């Protein structure tokens, strides 16, 4: 399922995002290349849409990105969107919790890889 806000966010249209939200679009919908509209708008530094999504209940710590393991704070900081980082931190983003989640995610994937590629070979 692709978030209905993604096309509006990509098109830089606060008006379209407002329209979609009034029509009941899920502000926290997951899907698409970037994972969710909030992640993408933070990545692109779209301050107005970030504020709008936050004002309508966007999960400030939701993970997105290609592998679903980065937060909006990480995306904005990696893309040098300092204004967005400041907004997110002021609104309660938890970058430390985000990093812990990312580390756990990576460790789990590494364990799965090791089991699949090495442990099974040793025991069979």
Image: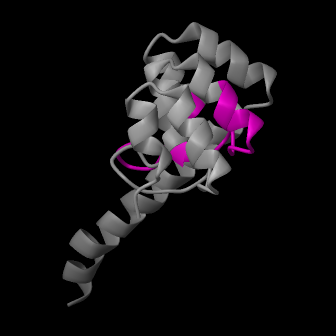
Give the quarter of the figure containing the C terminus.
Answer: bottom left
Asked if one can make out residue 71 in the rendered structure from this viewpoint, the answer is no
Q: Is residue 56 magenta?
A: yes
Q: What x and y, as percent, mark residue 11?
A: 38, 29
Q: Is residue 13 magenta?
A: no
Task: Write the residue at 61% across / 27% down.
Answer: 50
> As drawn, is 122 to the left or to the right of 55?
left
- Vertical relation: 40 (above or below) 35: above
> As drawn, is 77 to the left or to the right of 50?
left
Residue stretch rendered in magenta on the structure: 51-72
Give the quarter of the figure containing the N terminus.
Answer: bottom left
In the picture as drawn, the residue positioned furthest to the bottom comes out as: 124
Viewer-closest of 8 and 61:
8
Q: What x and y, as percent, mark residue 66?
A: 35, 45
Task: Write the residue at 56% across / 47% down.
Answer: 20
> As drawn, is 69 to the left or to the right of 87?
left
- Vertical relation: 98 (above or below) 101: above
Viewer-closest of 69 and 22:
22
Its colouring scheme is: one colour
Viewer-closest of 4 and 105:
4
Task: Write the residue at 26% across / 87% down.
Answer: 123
Q: What x and y, as percent, mark residue 30?
A: 50, 56
Q: What x and y, as percent, mark residue 98?
A: 63, 40
Task: Write the residue at 59% across / 55% down.
Answer: 25
Asked if one can make out residue 3 in the rendered structure from this viewpoint, the answer is yes
Viewer-closest of 83 and 109:
83
């Amino acid at each position: 399922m692709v978030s209905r806000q993604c096309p509006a966010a990509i098109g830089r249209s606060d008006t379209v995002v407002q329209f979609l939200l009034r029509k009941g679009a899920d502000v926290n919908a997951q899907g698409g290349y970037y994972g969710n509209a909030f992640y993408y708008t933070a990545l692109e530094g779209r301050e107005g849409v970030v504020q709008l999504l936050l004002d309508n209940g966007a999960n400030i710590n939701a993970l997105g990105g290609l592998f679903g393991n980065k937060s909006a704070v990480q995306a904005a900081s990696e893309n040098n969107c300092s204004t967005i980082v400041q907004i997110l931190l002021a609104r309660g983003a938890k970058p430390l919790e985000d990093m812990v989640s990312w580390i756990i995610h990576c460790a789990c994937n590494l364990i799965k890889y090791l089991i699949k590629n090495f442990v099974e070979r040793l025991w069979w």
